[in-house]
Image (cartoon, rainbow, N blue to C red):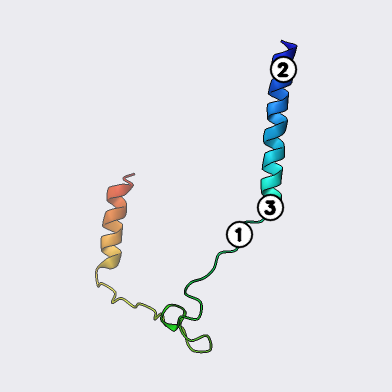
């Protein structure tokens, strides 16, 4: 019994030391293959390429939302 407890303790100690060593070792640096690509990042000093999307409001959107709300949450 003592031998089993000793081996389990040694295994737990080895696992905990292994996790500590991995936590203190930083991962390798990832190289950005698209660095400086204006197609992906755009012009650093220019305006953003994304534009705000605007949608026309439906005339009956409030009634429609109430109808869906009543279907989902009948009370």
State the residue position of label 1.
28
Q: Which of 11 and 56 is in front in this view?
A: 11
- Precedes in sequence: disc 3 or disc 2: 2
State the residue position of label 2.
5
Q: In which quarter of the image is the C terminus?
A: top left
Q: Which of 48 and 40 is in front in this view?
A: 40
Q: How crowded is mark 2: few (under 14 residues within 10 Å), some or many (20 or more)?
A: few
Question: Residue drawn 62% across and 56% down?
Answer: 27
Q: Distance between the residues labelled 3 and 2?
A: 31 Å
**Residue 16: x %, y % from top left:** 70, 36
Q: Farthest residue in the bottom direction?
A: 46
Rendering quarter of residue 65:
bottom left
- 66 to 75, vertically: above or below: below
Number of dots carrying numbers: 3
Checking the image for residue 25, the label placed there is 3
**CB contact under 8 Å: marks 1 and 3:** no
- 49 to 20, vertically: above or below: below
Secondary structure under badge 3?
A: loop
Checking the image for residue 10, the label placed there is none
Question: Residue drawn 30% across and 65% down?
Answer: 62
Secondary structure under badge 1?
A: loop
Secondary structure under badge 2?
A: helix
Q: In this rendering, which labeled residue sits more in front, label 1 or label 2?
A: 1
Q: Distance between the residues labelled 1 and 2?
A: 38 Å
């Amino acid at each position: 019994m003592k031998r089993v407890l000793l081996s389990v303790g040694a295994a737990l100690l080895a696992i905990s030391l292994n996790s500590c060593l991995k936590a203190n070792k930083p991962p390798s640096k990832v190289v950005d293959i698209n660095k400086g690509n204006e197609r992906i990042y755009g012009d650093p000093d220019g305006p953003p390429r994304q534009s705000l999307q605007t949608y026309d409001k439906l005339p009956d959107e409030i009634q429609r939302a109430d109808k869906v709300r009543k279907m989902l949450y009948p009370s």
